[in-house]
Image (spheres, rainbow, N blue to C red):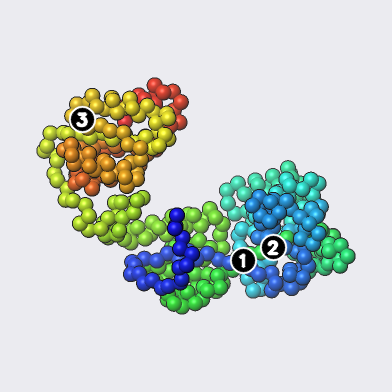
Amino acid sequence: TRAIDLTETEYDVEQHVDAIILAVGTQLYDPRHSEEYGYGRFPNVITSMEYERLVSRSGPTEGVVTRPSDNVAPKKIAWLQCIGSRDQDHPYCSSICCMYATKEAVLAKERIPGVECRVFIMDERAFNKEYNAYLDQARQKYEIDFTRSRISSLKEDPQTHNLIARYMTPEGKPEEQVFEMVVLSVGMEPPSQAAALAKRMGIRLNAYGFCETDKFSPLETNRSGVYVCGAFQSPKEIAETLIDASGAAAEVMRLLSTKLGRAPHSRQYPFLARNGEFPPERNTTQEAPRIGAFVCSCGDAISRTVNTDALVTFARKLPGVVHTEQVSYLCLTEGQAHMRHAVENRGVNRVVVAACCRPVGETHAGVQRTPSADAPCARDRRWRIRDDHCARDRGRGL
């Protein structure tokens, strides 16, 4: 399909923009810097990301959890928390480790019959809604043991490659246990190029190397027009990064609100069009109504529940309607072009659109926006109505 040019080489592009969103992400701590845990020396000490690949159905073992040393399923697994977090070099909490370690232990329980899972934690930090309930379920239903202790080092049995962990119990008693595999829950740290990027863009970083923002403006950097979202602002999980991304996009839209109509349009957002691309709107308020009704079947997403053919026939009989038509996809450029030609050729000065989203073909045709109407079939969840007559009546009512 030539969608990708494999022979293309790297080149620089210069763009003049009004706003920038820094969504550069973060990187995971390299546990080789913590030599006491033996990562890279002990084969059965792996990182949380490596464990994720083991449990993935598309991973190297197709979801079967095995020890790297002998490809045998482990019967006793330990998770060590806060590796690269809450220490002298990284005094902050990475905020994601408690939950992903719990999830990984649950997956081990589901994949390996009789496996014993123990998570060594400093504190339970289940930040978001229902996370604490998930931890309780891991304890009660899956019998995962959460031990409040920080392992200072690991030793390996050279014969079996098992790992020996010594720690203090919450009661202050020394304890030693042998595990067949140990997973290091590594934390987040700023991306390696963060300092160079900050210097180049003139933005400040905080004491931990993440992007500095104000507490009440967590998406704004010290430089006007430059915003940040996601883990580059601070360690956070996917749900929070999505909220950040939406917020940053909203900030940019607010900043550029006076410049709408100047950007090249796309298939998804044709209302962001270049100056002069739309014909001038003509005032149709004093003209006799000549209504064009366009019904989108959305492939079959709408038509399989609402009888769109009957809806078109019904609209054709309404007073003032001079054109009715069913279009497969009004949201696509082809569908909007079809509607535009119909508006122009039939002299339509009022437009009614029944679709899941509002297309802008009437704007391209010069129809004034005020006498246009939108009947939100999909947004009103029309396809969930199982009674054909009910769906038909509600569609007509719109």
Label 2 or label 3, whichever comes before in sequence order: 2
Q: CA distance from mark 3 to mark 1?
A: 62 Å
Residue 220, picture quadrant: bottom left
Q: Which residue lies most toward the right here?
A: 159
- The quadrant of the picture occupied by the C terminus is top left
Residue identified by numbered label 3: 321
Residue at 83 percent of width and 67 percent of height: 156
Q: Position of residue 79 (x, y in %)?
A: 73, 58
Neighbours of disc 1 within 10 Å: few (<14), some (14-19), many (20+): some
Q: Are marks 1 and 2 in contact (CB under 8 Å)?
A: yes
Label 1 or label 2, whichever comes before in sequence order: 1
Dot 3: element: strand
Foreground pick, 339 / 378: 339
Residue identified by numbered label 1: 28
Foreground pick, 251 / 75: 75
Residue at 63 percent of width and 64 percent of height: 187
Residue at 66 percent of width and 70 percent of height: 30
Q: Which residue lies most toward the top here?
A: 389
Q: Is residue 288 left or right of residue 304?
A: left
Q: Which residue lies most toward the left here?
A: 286
Residue type (three-letter) at the residue carrying disc 1: Leu
Residue 15, picture quadrant: bottom left
Residue type (three-letter) at the residue carrying disc 3: Val
Q: Nearer the viewer, mark 2 or mark 3?
A: 3
Q: Position of residue 233 (x, y in %)?
A: 50, 65
Dot 1: element: strand
- Give the answer, above or below, for where 199 lies relative to 146: below
Q: Are marks 2 and 3 in contact (CB under 8 Å)?
A: no
Q: Is residue 167 visible?
A: yes
Residue type (three-letter) at the residue carrying disc 2: Thr
Numbered tag placed on residue 47 in the rendering: 2
- The quadrant of the picture occupied by the N terminus is bottom left
